[in-house]
Amino acid sequence: MQIYKAPLRDMRFVLHELLDAKQLSKLPGYEEATADTIDTIIEEGAKFCQDKLLPLNRVGDEEGCTYENGVVRTPPGFKQAYNDFVGAGWQSISSDPNYGGQGLPALMNFVIEEMVCSTNIAFGVYPLLSRGAASLIERHGSDDIKETYLPHLADGSWSGTMCLTESQCGTDLGLIRTKAVPAGNGKYSISGSKIFISAGEHDLSENIIHLVLAKLPDAPEGVRGISLFLVPKLSVNGRGTAAEVGSRNGVACGSIEKKMGIHGSATCVINFDEAEGYLIGDPHKGLRCMFTMMNGARLGVGMQGLALGETAYQSATAYAKERRSGKSLTKGTKSADVADPIIVHPDVRNMLLTARAYNEGARALAYWTALQLDLSTHHPDAETRRDADEIVQLMTPVIKAFLTDRGFEAANLAVQVHGGHGYISEHGIEQLVRDARIAQLYEGTNGIQALDLVGRKLSLHTGRLLRHFFHPATEFVETNQETEELKDLVLPLAKALEKLQQATLVIAQKGLGDPEEAAAVATDYLKMFGLVAVGYMWLLMAEKAVAKAADANGDARFYANKLKTAQFYMHKLLPDASAAFLRIMTGKYAAAQFNEEDF
Ligand SMILES: Cc1cc2nc3c(=O)[nH]c(=O)nc-3n(C[C@H](O)[C@H](O)[C@H](O)COP(=O)(O)OP(=O)(O)OC[C@H]3O[C@@H](n4cnc5c(N)ncnc54)[C@H](O)[C@@H]3O)c2cc1C
């Protein structure tokens, strides 16, 4: 059975003890983000997700979305849950207060996103896209567009989509064929067909605002010729809160996909037939604007990975404490029972702790990155804003790919802990695997994230992005190498960090002469980077746990477990970085020696 209780103690540890999140309340615009407000939000968010979204997770999977004559219906209960969600203001917590949002830190959204997706990832897709559409419009829309669309996206009466993919292209957007023709009055006529559009059509909101990539008649070839358009499903009359939906625009849903998981999320073919649209940003520069939405969505998808990893861990742990099989091999334990709970077995413990150590480390990395996101937008000092933004840029592909790979691994391990019962639909555990799988694919496959890290982020500003991470991590390691309580943890990380820096240099050197050398090891590099980045978070958490353990007042077990989990991470999981390092050193040779005909 899927089990989930929001890990509030761990969330508070990361938010308050590790990150001192209330520091955000000192930034202009974030005055309300006090420690009390943060706690109230996460507690209320937890209740909402546990009470309203978790009970709909199975029904969403089993009944899915339905399509009939262009109309898409979400699973039973989704509409009510959506109304409750937007009614309670969860949609708009970090949206612009000038347009109906609550203007709270993005960090809050990350925490809510985690809980929403732990309890119902398919439901979570709808608000994720609406928030992404809103942030794109906030950043790149004209005043007119902002006033007309943002208040409705903030109150959830309208929802958003991102329309990039076409049947002939997903990764290579330079190949898109959707056309935009100027139609006078600053409007454009959009025609073409998009596939795999999440939340492209549904019954949750009154209107759907599509953000569509298309090419103008004079567009240059490839990605340099892509423009971005806002295309509402129903045309809009008037402005601001007085804006009202009018007649049907030339937008229709052709069908929805049958798919492996996230059945409650409608994945649609959306056909544009001379639909009225509005240009966002400059002609031919649309991809750059779309990246605002894509980068936000990549972080959101990373949270989906962590979210499912958490539910997988909790469900597997509950099962491992109940299910009896075999006797404990621990010397001196002789229970009278014929069989012990499977949690006594080292192999089962290894599986549980793998998921747990990744989850807790990933949570720290994701929330830390979210804090940087808030600093990058609200800190008064320009250099601090720039540095924080560069950390977010560096970490975005790592969070997207590393967290979703680990989330899938945790879901898979949860099946393993359940034995054959994990494979049987009745228990709901196989759903976690099916749901987790998509996060490795959409928003740019994890292979593409690795290429982004290696091909773009490493060399940006002559390696300055990397230095934002390497410098503090190296300094921490050097300062604490002799710290008695930490050195057992610091040593493995110090070695892995040194190897990561070595690998970075090798890739930079080889990649200069032959880009294929860098591309061939990109996935290994991202994995190694993720392992080290999460390892650094574990060191920071261990340092806090050591400091707090002395006067823990009843919380001693929490801090002791933090330290034990840190040890598990450093000694059982971080060693994978050495294997990745060896693969990186091999370079492209092992695979490149095959000709296409050899496959
Ligand atoms: C359920 C679901 C929901 C989705 N939601 C949306 C949505 O809301 N909006 C939207 O626009 N799209 C959406 N997508 C599309 C999704 O983003 C794409 O499927 C994804 O980006 C991959 O594109 P593709 O399927 O065309 O694969 P391809 O681009 O054909 O890639 C196939 C394989 O080749 C690799 N590859 C491709 N190019 C390169 C390269 N240059 N270098 C190295 N490797 C490469 C890829 O990593 C992948 O392993 C969704 C997809 C699904 C399944």
Image (cartoon, grey):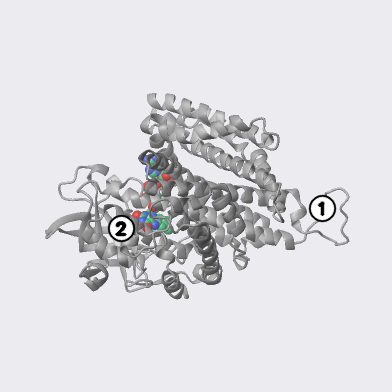
Q: Quadrant of the N terminus?
A: bottom right
> 7 or 97: which is nearer to us?
97
C-alpha distance separating marks 1 and 2: 56 Å
Residue extending furthest left?
184
- Amino acid of disc 2: Lys
Quadrant of residue 484 within the rendered picture? top right
Q: Position of residue 287 (x, y in %)?
A: 29, 47
Of labels 1 and 2, the one closer to you? 1
Q: Is residue 430 above or below residue 407?
A: below
- The crowding category of the residue bearing disc 1, from other C-alpha atoms within 10 Å (few below 14, some 14 to 19, many at least 20), is some
- Label 2 beta carbon less than 8 Å to ligand 1: yes
Q: Residue 95: in sight, yes or no?
A: yes
Q: Which residue is mark 2?
A: 194
> Residue tagged by mark 1?
328
Tell me if 263 is positioned left or right of 72 in this view: right
Residue 162 occupies quadrant: bottom left
Disc 2 element: strand
Looking at the picture, tell me which residue is in the foreground, 447 or 378.
378
Q: Amino acid at mark 1?
A: Ser
